[in-house]
Amino acid sequence: LSMKYDIQGSIQINQNEKLSVTGIGYLEKDWGYSFPSLWIWGQANQWENLPSTSSASLFFSFASIPWHFNIKFPGFLMVFEYNHQFYRFNSYLQSIINDLSVNNETNQLSFTVYDVLFQHKLHVSTYCDESEYISSALLYGPRNGGMEKFVHEILGRNIYFDVQLSRLIQNETLNRDSDDPFVQHGYYEEILFQERAVSIALEITGDVNWLTEELRKTYENVYPWNFSLIRSLIQYYKLIITSIISVIIIWLFLVKYR
């Protein structure tokens, strides 16, 4: 996965004139022989008002993951890079998706994701002028080991991603009157990044309503104040590992100098 790099070269289509090309690139490699039956994928690394001294790049995907015995489950993977620091959110790291909403007819998309310990929050939503035509390209993609032309990808200048990255801080000041459950439990947000991405790429394919419903059922009641055992262990893993190592060292010392 290469989030952002400079492009300089040329392109020629059939016998047309060769054109010089410069720009910003993005590259990822996948393994397998077929795309999933349904997925959402988005990418952006160009921003409306980001200073030239800063860098930022976003990649996200949601998909139906096939398993044995015709079992499938929802999964997601996201990486946000800001000033050379990477923030990773994904299923296998126990990240939490909240409020995924998507419409593949209007290309409206919105979601919020938290890391496993609720230390960082990433919110992404699309913005587009519905009165304007949003162009898409039909691309080749893997299907049953071959390459077929079936992937609809939006590559337009009239659709944007609004992106916000925040750090969650617990200040113990509860506000039960707030509609925000985090504020109710004494959390506030320190905004680290807030920008609009331009020249984005977006794919929404298949029955994505299944994705939104399955993710809602999985994560709708997951909050830091009702941590599961797994998240509690992750939260205190350094203390647990240090304690185990200390016990082993003391035991070895006692055995040796008994």
Image (cartoon, rainbow, N blue to C red):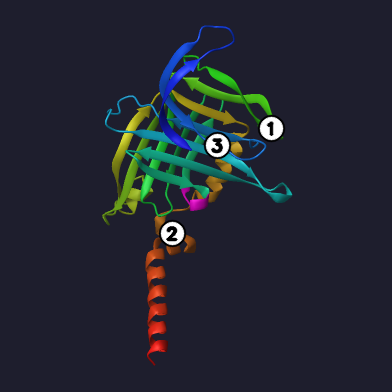
Badge 2: residue crowd in 10 Å (few <14, some 14–19, many ≥20): few
Residue located beneath label 3 in the image: 29
Label annotation for residue 60? none
**Amino acid type, callout 1:** Arg
Question: In this picture, is 236 found above or below 59?
Answer: below
236 or 98: which is nearer to us? 236
Q: In 3D space, how far apart are the residues under numbered discs 2 and 1 (Cα atoms)?
A: 42 Å
Distance of mark 3 from mark 1, alpha carbons?
16 Å
Depth order, front residue of 187/21? 21
Say which of 126 and 203 sits in front. Answer: 203
Label 1: which residue? 143
What residue is drawn where x is 50% and y is 35%? 101
Location of residue 16 in the rendering, given as x and y in whole percent from the top left corner:
55, 6
Find out whether residue 94 is within the magenta segment.
yes
The range drawn in magenta is 92-96
Q: In which quadrant will I find the C terminus?
A: bottom left
- Label 3 neighbour load within 10 Å: few <14, some 14-19, many 20+: few
Q: Residue furthest bottom?
A: 258
Residue type (three-letter) at the residue carrying disc 2: Asn
Q: Which type of secondary structure does the marked residue at label 1 adopt?
A: strand
User: Residue 1: x percent and y percent?
Assistant: 48, 38
Which residue in the structure is indicated by mark 2? 226
38 in magenta: no
